[in-house]
Amino acid sequence: MDETIPLCDVPERFLDNQAWRELLEFARSKTSALALLNSPRPEGEMDLSWGPAESMAEDHARFRRFENARNLTQAARELFRAGTLVAFGYQKNMPDRVQIPKDRWEQLHPMFATNRAVWMDLEFSSLQVIEAEKLSTPHERMHSRCVSWLQARRVAGERSKKQLKHEAFKHFGPALTDRMFEVAYKIVFDSPRGRPRKH
């Protein structure tokens, strides 16, 4: 996947160019602009992350910047949810990057400055992103197909790993490996637990 880019490059490559340039101009550095994409709504005059609020005009300007950043983040999530962009990342205790199923972006939030996607105690790190149409290797295509197939089974209420594994090998044939199935099953059926993270 030599055409992948890190998550931190998604805003300038795939999102609204003018909106990103405005945020970048205000933040004065890419690192600061990326951090603002995940910053909370400005609260009170002492919160200067979005600019000063000494007048009504300044207060309006900083809320406009916040809305701009929120819209950019939501636009990125929509691209992932639609499957237009595909992200790969590391999960805890897994040695290889795995493809993040597009339906997981209903909950996951992209953390652009740190190249992560998080929700509750679920986290994917060191994200690399590629346009779906550029997924090219047989391994990647099989992985994507297996994840989609397992997602459909999950929606149908099936969960038995032993039974699904038997059916998957019957469905996909020898192109599917044990490791591929194990990785795909983990990312589709492993549910996060615990309280939401604080960012």
Image: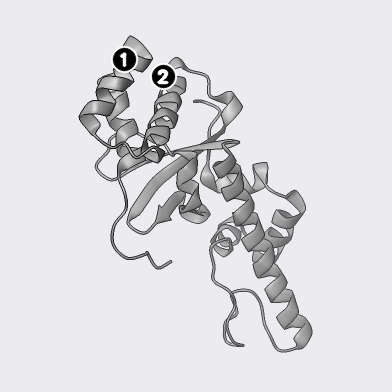
Judged from this view, the residue extending furthest toward the top is 174
Q: Nearer the viewer, mark 2 or mark 1?
A: 1
Residue receiving disc 1: 170
Residue 124, can we see it?
yes
Tell me the residue at 37%/64% (across/down).
197
The residue beneath circle 2 is 139
Q: Nearer the viewer, residue 182 or 198?
A: 182
On the image, which quarter does residue 100 sit in? top left
In the picture, measured across the screen, residue 175 lies left or right of residue 136, that is left
Q: Vertical placement of 161 versus 13: above or below?
A: above
Residue at mark 2 to residue at mark 1: CA–CA distance? 18 Å
Which residue is the extreme one toward the left? 162
The secondary structure type at the circle numbered 2 is helix
Q: In the rendered image, which quarter is residue 47 located in?
A: bottom right
Residue at 28% x, 62% y is: 194
Q: Position of residue 45 (x, y in %)?
A: 61, 88
Quadrant assignment for the C terminus: bottom left
Q: Which residue, as the protein is rendered here, is positioned at the far front?
A: 156
Instruction: Determine if residue 28 is in view.
Output: no
The amino acid type, in three-letter code, at marker 1 is Lys
Q: Specify whether 4 is left or right of 157.
A: right
The amino acid type, in three-letter code, at marker 2 is His
